[in-house]
Image (cartoon, coloured by chain):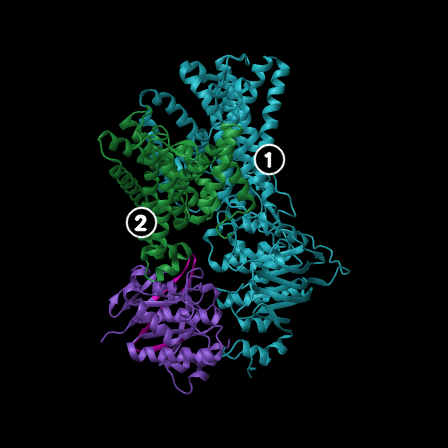
Amino acid sequence: MSAALQVEGLASGYATSEVINDVSFTLAKSEVLAIVGKNGMGKTTLLKAVLGFLPAWRGTVRLDGKDITRIPPHLKRRLGLVYVPQEQALFQDLTIRDNLRLGLLSDRELDEALDQAGRWFPVLTQRLQQRAGTLSGGEQKMLVLARALTARPEVLLLDEVTEGLQPSLVDRVSEVLTRVRHEIGTSIIVIEQHLPFALGIADRYLVFKRGEIVDSAGVDARSAARIETHMRI
Amino acid sequence: MLTVALDAVTTAALLFIISSGLLIVFGVMKIINFAHAAFVTVGAYAALVGARLGLPWVLVLPLAFIAGAACGGLTEITIVRRLYQRPLDAILATWGLGTVIGQIITLIFGREVQFVQAPFTGTIDLLGVDYSAYRIAMIAAAVIVALVFAGLLNGTRLGLSTRAVIMNEMLAQGLGVDSARVRLLTFAIGSGLAALSGALITPLSSVDPNMGLPWLIGAFMLVMVSGGSLLTLAVSCLVLGGLQVIVSTFINPILGGLTIAICAAIVLRIRPEGFARA
Amino acid sequence: MPEVQQLGRTATAPFGASAKLSMVVLALLIVGSLALAPLVLDSYMVNILIRAFFVAIAAVTVDIVWGYCGTLTFGQSAFFGIGVYALAIVFTEFGFGSWQAVVAIAAAVVAAAAVAALTGWLSFYPGSTPLYASIVSLVVPIVLVQIIYSGGTFTGSSSGLVGFESFDLEFENWFRLAGLSLAVVTAVALIVLRSDTGRLLKALRDNDERCTYLGINTSRYRIVVLVVTGIVASLAGFGYAAVGGVAAPENASFTFGTRLIIMVALGGRGTIIGAVVGALCIEVASAYLSGSLPYVWELIIGIALIAVILAFPDGLVGVIRRLTRGVQQIPRGAATRLLPTMAAAAADNASQVAIEVRELGKHFGSLSVLDGVRFTAHRAELLSLVGPNGAGKTTLIRCLSDGRERSTGFVAIAGHAIDRLPPDRIVQFGLGRKFQAASVFETLTVAECLRVARTHRVRPSLTAASVDLELPPAAISVVERSGLADRLGEEARNLSHGLKQALELAMVLSLEPEVLLLDEPTAGLTRAERQAFADILTALASRDRLCIVLVEHDLDFVREISSRIIVLHQGKIALDGSVDEVVNSALVREIYTGQSKVCETAP
């Protein structure tokens, strides 16, 4: 059985500067992988290169065994690779309903999706016709997550999804992700600075530092301490 | 007095139809298509051909739209697509295209001014004033265009995707929207609209290879002032178009021709992003 | 005392001795051909060339405004038309004579200058976009033509003016005069554009914002350029009408304006020579071909324009250059020599307060990005500004550097209140701002970038490309430590990310600022670069007594070099204290919930 996502020797960056160099890792089916590391280390660049928003200068990306390195971003989405960006993840001027609509590939599944979003995060369905920009920061994150999950993704890439969320909401997010993962079998990559959350739901973790992977292991009781040592200079 | 008011409204209606295509292109692609005038002319000549072939207007209008859309689609694929990062160069390249189209039309049809008969002539008696029926029909046409557009943008999936691309193209792509296709369709539709407006104005003015040009500057300024909203465009057309008619009638027709350009330049100086968010 | 980079004569002309010789030969050739050509060519060709020479002068002005300053202008034709009509109207109304000629020239110059100043004021205000400037340049000739149409017999309306008596020169002499004028204009343009001032114009085109933050009033420069080129174009029109004896509205039209742009685009924008070549070729070809193949010729031009824009943006001259020189990156200009400036007498009694902020707020409607921010920073302080994403850090930096940004509150930099002043004025109070993405001038060399950075201290030469470059010791130190000193002649766009950051820092230090604002300066740097950076900043604070404010995410970097940390959270200051206080604070830990615990003191 092929891996959900397999990255080999990936190198990418901006104009004259190479940010990630020779990155390789595998995401198994239904696995949750946490990629941790401080800001500015290249984690978002890695995601963008996997998705095709940045050119892959070297290396390959495979989705379920199929080489998708050079496929444009919108086609990757159609293959089931769903991305939740850290910033500017919503259309502020569109309604909640329209934002959720855009998460789906067609309107046929819309009603069921709206129901489901309401079950996970009730506050959303109470205000479907409101502009997304009127929601609080935490509510916006929930909307973004609902949009991603109702798409029933094969592979889900979450970039700092708990940023700015109060602890009770972080727990809710954990809960929903775990449930969805068991129901649909989604494979998930979480990029996180919030270690307790990341280690709470992940099966494995990678530590990303200055554009490369410096540590990789299964999650257990000593993981937190091990990761700390990498976060220091 | 009523005549002047009617002139103002019908002029605004014409301006709206001509500018709406340019607005949609600018909103989605953030570039100004200087070949817009040429597409207007293409539509006018399509109407000429249709009239000569004896086609009924019901067929002439769609024919013009299709001719414009085809030209637009071809333009997007061959020229505009490569110039997204260079908006000023896009202005120049589309201007070049405009002259090319103008010359081709001249080579085929010759330079003389031609005339097309209106599908219906005569006047309507409105509150004691006899006013050209065809001009009144322009108002209806503008309203139909606006409604169809609003309907498409707000009611269809494609419209939603288009609005998404306008707001944040990268996010839209990440959500599965084929933004390249959206751009192509938008450009084609915008050009088709330009041609449609060209066909509609033929009975009101003469047809010659450069007829689109005077409308280009006005349309361009109106689009800049509207900042991307169809509603604001309608309002701008009414205000500035009305002003143009008033100045032309009461002061000086030549000054009238300048009203839109000068007012828009001043407005943009005060409020560079236009009035979409007002 | 840093070593002098290269011993050598302090040359101040842009060309060396052998280049000077070839220029003299070239000049002789040009003068010679102009003298002899009318005797050899047929009179039809001579006639065409005379007009073509004047049009080429107008094309050169278009290249200066578009190719060098970056404004796509359709309006230079308006100035040409002003010159045409100034002559025609004066000679029609008052006949021909010496005082009438003087009045006509004066009218041409004054009217052009006035219109250019007005156009410039309208187009180039702080915050204007290149698109808006293009729009205005479009409107000017249209308005002018309409004014001409409505002028009745005074302006000849749509038929123009003919039959006025004009200067009595033989055609051959008109040829020499026009040709010589073109040669002089071209030579002057080339000299000025290769000088330090020319580099400054290119910097304006490459990165207007960076120029503003180097204390340069970009609007004023652009307006001056427009006025000068407007006057030159007007005089070209004057000559055109003088020889042609006709004034027509087409001479001022938007169509002619686009024609000029096409000439520059096809010939090669940004080269001056390209404008001349393009104008001459098109004018001559038009004259011969538009008679026999009228529509086809216009068609060819349209297609050529599209082809050039898509495939050969450098135009004909660019293609020739690439064929003859290959793609080598030849470092440009005579090797630059770096010299340290005299250390400014440190005014010890100068105010120690570098930044003062009181009740600073920034609101968008009901959304509050910053609220009630107040703090004071002193010289020799290294203050780090930290906080989660969206806390308002970059907004705060913007409010400190641009008087128009904040909604409420008071800000003073180096003792001067910033009120609602634009960045270029605040920079002159002693502020330097370094952007997050390395903001330099891509098409200028390293040395040229640094020289532009010295503009507000040292007026750039109009004629020379100086070889000596005086920089303050702090800037020289950065240039040498980073390795830029070996690459002074390379274009900035070829530098690596780390080097661009170093270059921008050196540029900002060249301002000799008292206050330095840095936005995430270590993003994307290697470990070695980061360390070098830390050393530089620490030295700047302690030795040069700068007040440094740093926005950073890398908390280890912050902990290592700061003397003080301000934590921003949801637009308000959550904590303001020494490194120890902040690092050990429970509040900070809470704000960065779950963040890798920087707060735990490592043994």
The answer to whether A191 is drawn above or below residue C462 in the figure is: below
Q: Is residue C364 visible?
A: yes
| Chain C tint as drawn | cyan
**In the structure shown, which secondary structural element does the residue marked by tag 2 occupy?**
helix
Residue for badge 2: B185
Amino acid beneath label 2: Leu
Label 2 crowd bin: few (<14), some (14–19), many (20+), radius 10 Å: some
Relative image position of residue B247 (x, y in whole percent):
52, 32
Tell me the magenta residue range.
A10-35
**In the structure shown, which secondary structural element does the residue marked by tag 1 occupy?**
helix
**In the image, what residue occupies the spot 40% across and 14% down?**
C42
Relative image position of residue C344 (x, y in whole percent):
71, 54
| Chain B tint as drawn | green
Query: What is the residue that sits farthest to the bottom in this orientation?
Result: A221
In the rendered structure, find residue C117 and report the number of the disc placed on it. 1
Amino acid beneath label 1: Ala
Rendered purple, the chain in question is A
Residue B89 on the magenta segment: no
Quadrant housing the N terminus of chain C: bottom right
Label 1 crowd bin: few (<14), some (14–19), many (20+), radius 10 Å: some
Q: Main secondary structure of the magenta part?
A: strand
Q: Quadrant of residue C590?
A: bottom right
